[in-house]
Amino acid sequence: MCLAVPGEIIEITDRDPLTRSGRVRFGGIIKEVNLAYVPEAKVGDWVIVHVGFAISMLNEAEAERTLEYLAQIEAFNELEDDTLV
């Protein structure tokens, strides 16, 4: 299964169209991400990131909703782990 995660662009570090990159915040984690596939993205925008590449943009409400779903999945996984002990 492949998973793409929403993150917020906090800095653009390379503006060359082919190697465009930036720092993206995923909750408390900040990662360097390739932004070449979303040339219109700017600081403050939310992007979907898969294996280090921002593959599309989304609005903040969509990002928050997705993060809530991911938190629910994590809570469910923790519940399953507790029942296996």
Image: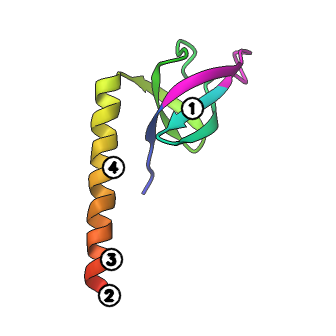
Give the labeled residue for mark 3: 81
Q: CA distance from mark 3 to mark 4?
A: 17 Å
> Who comes first in sequence, dot 2 or dot 4?
4
- Badge number at residue 74: none
Q: CA distance from mark 3 to mark 2?
A: 7 Å
Label 2: which secondary element = loop
Q: CA distance from mark 2 to mark 1?
A: 37 Å
Answer whether labels 3 and 4 touch (C-beta < 8 Å): no
Give the labeled residue for mark 4: 70
Q: CA distance from mark 4 to mark 1?
A: 18 Å
Quarter of image, res 19 = top right
Q: Is residue 74 magenta?
A: no
Q: CA distance from mark 2 to mark 4?
A: 23 Å
Q: Position of residue 42 (x, y in %)?
A: 54, 14
Answer whether labels 2 and 1 touch (C-beta < 8 Å): no
User: Is 43 left, or right, of 15 in this rendering?
Assistant: left
Q: Quick one: quadrant of the N terminus? A: bottom left
**Rendered view: 67 above or below 14:** below
- Point 62% across, 39% down: residue: 31
